[in-house]
Image: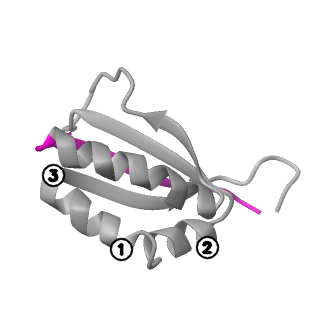
Amino acid sequence: MTAAYWIARVDVTDAEPYAQYAERLDAVIARFGGRFLVRAGRSETVEGGSRSRQVVIEFPSWQAAQDCYHSADYAPLITLRQTCSDVDLVIVEGTPQPGTR
């Protein structure tokens, strides 16, 4: 099975509600087998545009990544996030590892 990723670029516009969003997000991501690979660490934009925070979340499969985003658990967090940040978010399927299908 090939992993899939949420890749988000984020500008936080209101820190307090965004902190609530981030705290609640952990449980939702875990429920779908996801794990954070990148969560707003140091970054450098070397080409093109960017935002102040970069986030990469790995899921065990494309379906898990889709199911998480479209879940009833995540829906209220989308609404909360939209009140306190500007986000570009894509879901992308990873490349199969050698020796797997």
Q: Which is more foreground, mark 2 or mark 3? A: 3
Picture disc at residue 20 = none
**Residue 44 locus on image (x, y percent):** 30, 22
Type of the residue with mark 2: Gln
Farthest residue in the right direction? 99
Q: Where is residue 72 shown, x and y percent of the image?
A: 44, 79
Q: Specify whether 26 is left or right of 99.
A: left
Residue under label 3, please give it.
84
Residue at x 19% of width, y 42% of height: 16
Crowd rating for badge 1 (residues with CA inside 10 Å; few <14, some 14–19, many 20+): few
Dot placed on the residue nearer the N-terminal end, 1 or 3: 1
Give the residue type at disc 3: Cys
Count of number-bearing discs: 3
The disc, 2 or 3, on the residue closer to the chain's N-terminal end is 2
Query: In the depicted view, which residue is nearer to us: 61 or 93?
Result: 61
Q: Dot 1 corresponds to which residue?
A: 75
Residue 76 falls left or right of residue 99: left
The residue where tag 2 is placed is 63
Q: Is residue 4 visible?
A: no
Give the magenta-colored segment's residue range.
Answer: 1-14
